[in-house]
Image (cartoon, rainbow, N blue to C red):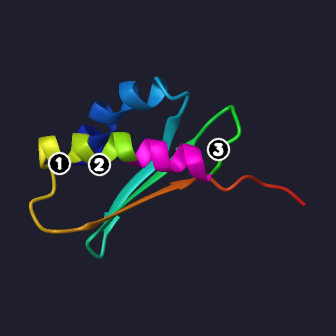
Amino acid sequence: MINEIKKVLNKPLEDLNLTIDEVKYENKTLYITLDSTETLDIDKIVKATNVISPILDQHDYIKESYTLDVSSKEKGGN
């Protein structure tokens, strides 16, 4: 399931200059962590979520109800 999710999301996210860092599913939550060479702010996360959600609904990989959690990869820093 994880590989299929990555596969269908890669191209639409690339169009937003985003890459998938990690996808995991646990405790009825699908976590998708994104990375970018550009600044990844809350507006970009919202835009990505608005792209991701309907694609996941269309493909229906997870049959039970779940929470979608889209976030940015943590960057090391001071």
Q: What residue is drawn where x is 71% and y is 40%?
A: 39
The residue identified by callout 2 is: 53
User: Which percent across, then down, holds residue 27?
Assistant: 29, 76
Mark 2 in CB contact with mark 3 (< 8 angstroms): no
Residue 77 is situated, as x and y percent measured from the top left of the image, at: 85, 56
Look at label 2 and name its amino acid.
Ser
Q: Answer with left or right where residue 36 lies relative to residue 26.
A: right
- Tags 2 and 1 touching, CB below 8 Å: yes
Q: Which residue is drawn at 35% across and 39% down?
A: 51
**Would you say 10 lies left or right of 45 here?**
left
The answer to if 43 sits in the magenta stretch is: yes
The span from disc 2 to disc 3 (Cα, nearest Å) is 18 Å
Q: Characterize the local packing of mark 2: few (<14), some (14-19) or many (20 or more) Cα atoms within 10 angstroms.
A: few
Q: Residue beneath label 1, please? A: 57
> Residue at point 73% right, 52% down?
75
Question: Taking 58 as reference, is 64 above or below it?
Answer: below
Amino acid under disc 3: Leu
59 lies above or below 23: above
Could you tell me how far apart the alpha carbons at marks 3 and 1 are, in whole angstroms? Answer: 24 Å
Query: On the image, numbered disc 3 is attached to which residue?
Result: 40
Which class describes the residues within 10 Å of circle 3: few (<14), some (14-19), or many (20+)?
A: some
